[in-house]
Image: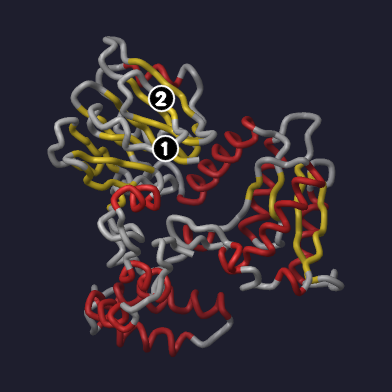
């Protein structure tokens, strides 16, 4: 399920076999079951496409008929989607600020081709794996200093998140303008803003498919989402919540927390347990993992994930699954953040956050803060380059697939 397009209508063949054009200008295409909503401007000169799951109502989409689109069009509504403007002169790509739907770009045949799949573009131009970018992902996944704007394939650029990218049809260079900035909202606390965003996102998913399932590991992330889904479901529906546990062990602390949470919503949650055995251990069946744009977080737990999804499909007929994966990435700062605070003279805040890190991990804050002080005296880019150079011979397969 991918989508893409060309900046020039004279190159309509720059698309995968089996894909379909989405407009009469033949500039944007989709392959697979991509959700698409289309709006024509009042003057008929511009067509706007929303690609992906978007919580906008039909009345909301009337905004897209105006001469100028709102700056926040790519994040105004809940969901994960990309907005495309097509006209005779240009194609404009509006990227979401979280890169939930990354879009990539490459020059080809005197023009530009963009796509939601970097691997598809790499196949088009014969690009190889970018081993430096891969090394950054493996060694320093939480410090994307050298990875900004780079895909996992050489020469394939990732469009900046929260941006408006103009791809001219005459083959001239694309123009990028950043339209999203983290402006503070004094009217609501960060916790209130996060809850509202999660509630709207969950409501949008429930509206599109109320017969969904959800992880309930016993942790904060999945439990919070399960509770939101439970109170959002329409009458007559119950959430199918699943807790994974080792085979033969149903007394773990996480399982206890999951049971307590499910009991609090006993009329709204159908709580089920799924036992996992040695054949579902991490790093099992890695050769079965399909090639993707980049190594997925679920790669090392592939066997467990696929078994879980197959079981839920058979038991519940579920087509949509909600998971708390990514909560840590969203809410936690990487450890190098402490070094940045010290480098800028904010020692007291660094000490406070270092204590929080240590308390969460039940360890001493002294080694963490000592390393932060040492790192604050070292150039971040120099340290990263040294690490990347040490593994620049990273291996990849002959077809350029990331596995």
Q: Estimate how packed mark 1 is, as few (under 14), some (14 to 19) or many (20 or more) residues with alpha carbons within 10 Å.
A: many
Circle 1 sits in a helix, a strand or a loop, which is it? strand
User: Relative to the observer, which residue lies in front, 384 or 357?
Assistant: 384
Identify the residue at horizontal 72%, vertical 56% (top origin): 308
| Residue drawn at the location 19% of the way across and 39% of the way down | 111
Q: Is residue 347 visible?
A: no
Instruction: State the residue in front, 389 or 288.
Output: 288
Task: List x then y, in percent, for residue 98.
Answer: 40, 49
Choose between 291 and 267: the one closer to the eye.
291
Tell me, for residue 3, which label it has, or none: 1
Q: Is residue 397 left or right of residue 364?
A: left
Cβ atoms under marks 2 and 1 closer than 8 Å: yes
Residue 379: image quadrant is bottom left
Q: Position of residue 257 (x, y in %)?
A: 76, 63
Determine if residue 306 is in view.
yes
Give the SS element for disc 2: loop
Against 137, residue 312 (above or below) is above
Q: How far across and how far down the image is residue 232, in percent?
A: 68, 36
Query: Residue 147 location, x and y as percent?
Result: 31, 63
Query: How is the structure coloured here?
Result: secondary structure
At 69% from the left and 73% from the top, the residue drawn is: 281
Q: Which residue occupies the foreground of this view, 117 or 20?
A: 20
The residue furthest top is 43
Q: Quadrant of residue 302?
A: bottom right
Q: Earlier in the sequence, mark 2 or mark 1?
A: 1
Identify residue for label 2.
22
Between the C-alphas of marks 2 and 1, the distance is 10 Å
């Amino acid at each position: 399920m991918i989508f893409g397009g060309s900046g020039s209508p004279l190159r309509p063949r720059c698309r995968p076999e089996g894909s379909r054009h989405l407009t009469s200008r033949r500039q944007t295409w989709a392959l697979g079951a991509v959700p698409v909503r289309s709006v024509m401007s009042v003057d008929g000169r511009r067509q706007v496409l929303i690609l992906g799951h978007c919580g906008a109502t039909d009345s909301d989409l009337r905004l897209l008929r105006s001469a100028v689109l709102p700056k926040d069009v790519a994040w105004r509504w809940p969901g994960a989607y990309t907005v495309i403007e097509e006209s005779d002169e240009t194609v404009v790509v509006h990227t979401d600020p979280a890169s939930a739907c990354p879009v990539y770009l490459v020059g080809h045949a005197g023009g530009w081709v963009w796509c939601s799949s970097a691997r598809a573009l790499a196949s088009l131009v014969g690009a190889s794996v970018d081993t430096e970018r891969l090394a950054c992902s493996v060694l320093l996944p939480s410090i994307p200093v050298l990875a900004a704007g780079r895909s996992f394939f050489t020469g394939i650029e990732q469009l900046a998140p929260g941006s408006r990218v103009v791809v001219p049809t005459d083959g001239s260079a694309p123009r990028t303008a950043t339209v999203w900035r983290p402006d503070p909202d004094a009217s609501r606390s960060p916790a209130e803003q996060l809850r509202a965003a999660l509630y709207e996102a969950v409501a949008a998913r429930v509206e599109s498919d109320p017969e969904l399932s959800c992880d309930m590991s016993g942790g904060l992330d999945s439990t919070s989402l399960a509770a939101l889904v439970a109170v959002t479901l329409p009458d007559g529906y119950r959430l199918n919540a699943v807790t994974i546990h080792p085979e033969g062990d149903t007394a773990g602390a996480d399982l206890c927390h999951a049971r307590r949470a499910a009991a609090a919503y006993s009329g709204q949650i159908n709580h089920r347990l799924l036992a996992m055995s040695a054949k579902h251990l991490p790093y099992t069946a890695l050769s079965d993992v399909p090639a993707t744009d980049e190594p997925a977080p679920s790669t090392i737990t592939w066997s467990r994930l696929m078994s879980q999804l197959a079981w839920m499909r058979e038991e519940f007929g579920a087509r949509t699954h909600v998971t708390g994966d990514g909560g840590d990435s969203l809410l936690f700062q990487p450890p190098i953040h402490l070094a940045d605070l010290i480098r800028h003279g904010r020692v007291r805040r660094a000490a406070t956050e270092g204590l929080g890190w240590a308390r969460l991990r039940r360890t001493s804050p002294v080694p963490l803060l000592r390393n932060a002080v040492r790192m604050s005296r070292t150039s971040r880019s120099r340290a990263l380059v040294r690490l990347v150079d040490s593994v620049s011979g990273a291996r990849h397969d002959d077809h350029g697939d990331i596995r």
